[in-house]
Amino acid sequence: MYSYTAYPTAAQFESVAAALISKHPCLQERGSTTRCCGWKNSLKHKMANYRTKRRQSGCLDVAVNAGKRGRHSAGQPANKRIKKANKGEINYLPNFLDGFDQAALEGACKDLVDEMQKRTPNGPLVKQKMDQTFALRRKQVVELEPAISTMVKRWPALFTEDQMFMEFSRIVGKNLKQEFYESIDRHSPRLLELFQSKRGNVGQLLRQISLQTDTTEPTAIRTQVLRGLPIILGDNPTNFFKVGFESDDDDSFRDLDIGILLVEREGAVLTSSQHLSPASLKIIIEGEVVMDNIQDLPKAMCILFGLTYALHLNYPKTMKLTFQFIQQVLLSLGHTDLKPKLQTLKNQLAM
């Protein structure tokens, strides 16, 4: 259990207890509605005791949570400011690899920066160094919460498409790109039906999007779905999707905390309608362009979702339900309990 998550949910404890009595029927409890209530409670206590032992031995993934409610036994201040792990993380704060200390990993970090400054970086070497420095990177991201500009300078490889997807796999153990696209494609037909059934202002906005999607090409359908999701969930994508020209200076999006910039070609007419086919897209975090020249919106949304895990970011407030839908429904990460709007939409998708 610990290899999957250090902090299992009640549902996960119950599923393990149920699997135990299924494998060994002689362990079923008489008088219990589920036949495994006692085993579930026992697993909770055993897991808590195991976390305590791991914490005392210096394992960072649980030690970081010590003292959140008060002070450490050593008199150190509480860790209340440290954010808890994102849902579904299996490598929240791993220990350094055997044989590597802080100084050695800092040297590997410098080697990475030097390699990324080359015209054509050595891909296998970059992957090796990124794997090697994963624990150092997580320690800095979780405990120090550095500015995005600092992360871009220290870990430039993290802001490449391949390494971002690998980082998500290191943290969560899932193939983000594959599962993201497969899940959207699976739900797209039903979502488009729901879009067409909407009336009022919501229906009008969704119709504006559908009028610009005159093809059955997969990328166009995914784009339509991702632009329609915030609308039916009640999010406000106005300050998340920004539109600009290739010649615009950086001041045009300095106030954007996190979002996607849709870059239109010079001379294009900017209207209030939805922009589904920009020339390219940029990902903005804390007013900084962290990735650019992204060719379509589904890829930009997929990458940005991965960056929220890689950089330990909160979801954008105006798009919180959309990101939670991606997390819990599309990728099945974290708790199965959904907020009412998400549960309603999930039920409608199953009809």
Image (cartoon, rainbow, N blue to C red):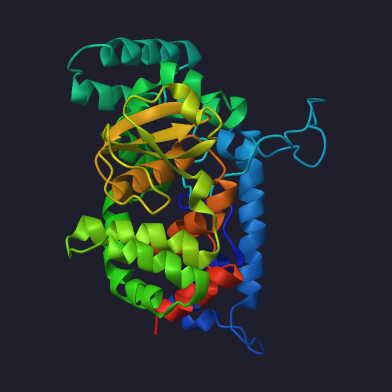
From the viewer's perspective, is 79 left or right of 250?
right
Instruction: Quadrant for residue 222, please give it.
Output: bottom left
Instruction: Give x and y (percent) for residue 47.
Output: 61, 55
* 129 vs 168, nearest the viewer: 168
**Residue name at image x 58 percent, y 33 percent:** 60
Question: Residue 17: in sight, yes or no?
Answer: no
In the depicted structure, whether residue 207 falls above or below residue 323: below
In the depicted structure, whether residue 310 falls above or below residue 144: below
**Residue name at image x 65 percent, y 86 percent:** 32
From the viewer's perspective, is 158 left or right of 295?
right
Instruction: Give x and y (percent) for residue 51.
Output: 62, 46
Instruction: Quadrant for residue 193, please give it.
Output: bottom left
In the depicted structure, whether residue 210 falls above or below residue 154: below
**Residue name at image x 48 percent, y 47 percent:** 89
Instruction: Give x and y (percent) for residue 335.
Output: 54, 62
Q: Quadrant of the C terminus?
A: bottom left
**Residue name at image x 79 percent, y 27 percent:** 77
In the depicted structure, whether residue 89 falls above or below residue 350: above
* 89 vs 94, nearest the viewer: 89
* 213 vs 78, nearest the viewer: 213
Question: Residue 119: in sight, yes or no?
Answer: yes
Q: How many marks?
A: 0
Instruction: Give x and y (percent) for residue 227.
Output: 39, 57
